[in-house]
Amino acid sequence: MHKEVLIENIDKIHTTEMGVERIQRNLGISEEPVSYCISKLKQENSTVTKEGKNYYVEVDDCRITVNSSSFTIITAHKI
């Protein structure tokens, strides 16, 4: 259910300038982080939960935090 909400609003998913640096640093990637996180969300094996005001996308070895009202990617971490 939560995954469908994120997929339906995929064009609204974004991050801040500080978020770009934080996500790249935390995940150890150099590519554009919004596209990277969206590709992770779209994976068949990704799971989405909601806790409070945030969605949490878990897939492979990372957990991506997305604000549920603004669709801003707040952070992402390796797990």
Image: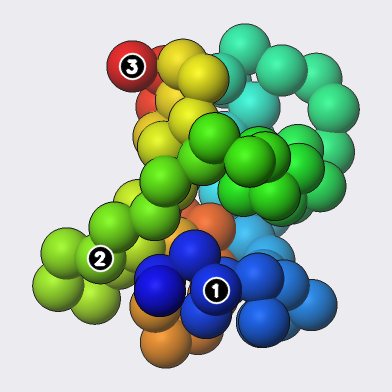
Coloration mode: rainbow
Q: Quadrant of residue 67?
A: bottom left
Residue 79's disc is: 3
On screen, 16 above or below 68? above
At a point 46% along the width and 16% down the height, the residue shown is: 61
Q: Position of residue 30 (x, y in %)?
A: 80, 20
Q: Is 35 placed left or right of 29 in the picture?
A: right
Q: SS at mark 1?
A: helix
Image spot of residue 21 (x, y percent): 63, 35
Instruction: Determine the secondary structure under disc 3.
Output: loop
The mark that comes first in sequence, 1 or 2, is 1
Q: Does residue 33 appear in this view?
A: no
> On the image, which quarter does residue 24 sit in?
top right
Look at discs 3 and 1 and give the one toward the viewer: 1
Kindly indicate whether the residue at mark 2 contacts the one at mark 1 (C-beta within 8 angstroms). no
Counting residues from the N terminus, which is met first, the one under dot 3 or under dot 2? 2
Q: Residue furthest bottom?
A: 69
Q: Which mark is residue 50?
A: 2
**Frontmost residue, 46 versus 39:** 46
| Residue 7, above or below 78 | below
The front one of 18 and 62 is 62
Crowd tier of the residue under label 1, counting other residues whose Cα lies within 10 Å: few below 14, some 14–19, many 20 or above: few
Q: Which residue is mark 1?
A: 4
Which amino acid type is shown beneath numbered disc 1?
Glu
Name which residue type carries label 2.
Lys
64 relative position to 35: left or right: left
Which quarter of the rendering shows the C terminus? Answer: top left
Residue 9: x percent and y percent?
A: 66, 82
